[in-house]
Amino acid sequence: MLCGCMQAPRSPEPTAQQCAPVTACTLPAMSPRLNGDLLDALDVTRAAWRDCSARVDMIRVCQAKGLPVLTKKDDE
């Protein structure tokens, strides 16, 4: 072998696919004081709901495929 060349690391063994567990959606705490702050708070809230909705949709699609749900015990 040439100096600086080495064997590539082995690929990890494939694992069974599992769905992410369902978690509660949370909204960030805010204290708007002015109209501009209120508009910013609305944007932040909409983004949080959008992220939550995407996560729920991802889990729903996963479960529709019949994949098992990942639990805390499986994650350890």
Image (cartoon, rainbow, N blue to C red):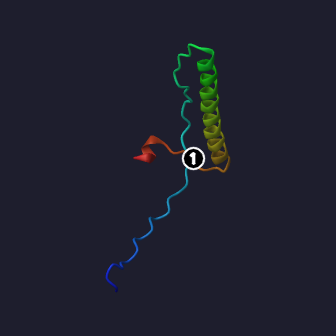
Q: Residue furthest bottom?
A: 1
Q: In the rendering, at what x and y percent does residue 2 appear?
A: 34, 85
Q: Which residue corresponds to the image point at 55% horizontal and 30% vertical from the top-left?
A: 24
Quadrant of res 72: top left
Q: In the rendering, at what x and y percent does residue 54 appear?
A: 64, 39
Quadrant of res 73: top left
Instruction: Establish if 41 lies above or below 61.
Output: above
48 displayed left or right of 74: right
Quadrant of the snapshot with the N terminus: bottom left
Q: How many marks?
A: 1
Residue picked out by circle 1: 19
63 displayed left or right of 4: right
Pick the residue in front: 5 or 32: 32
Quadrant of res 26: top right
Pick the residue in front: 37 or 22: 37
Q: Which residue corresponds to the image point at 61% horizontal and 24% vertical from the top-left?
A: 40
Mark 1 belongs to which amino acid? Answer: Cys
Regarding mark 1 in the picture, which secondary structure is present there?
loop
Q: Which residue corresponds to the image point at 57% horizontal and 30% vertical from the top-left?
A: 25
Instruction: Establish if 43 lies above or below 75.
Output: above
10 displayed left or right of 39: left
Q: In the rendering, at what x and y percent does residue 68 appear?
A: 57, 48
Q: Which residue corresponds to the image point at 63% horizontal and 44% vertical from the top-left?
A: 58
76 displayed left or right of 63: left
Instruction: Establish if 72 lies above or below 18.
Output: above
Pick the residue in front: 8 or 37: 37
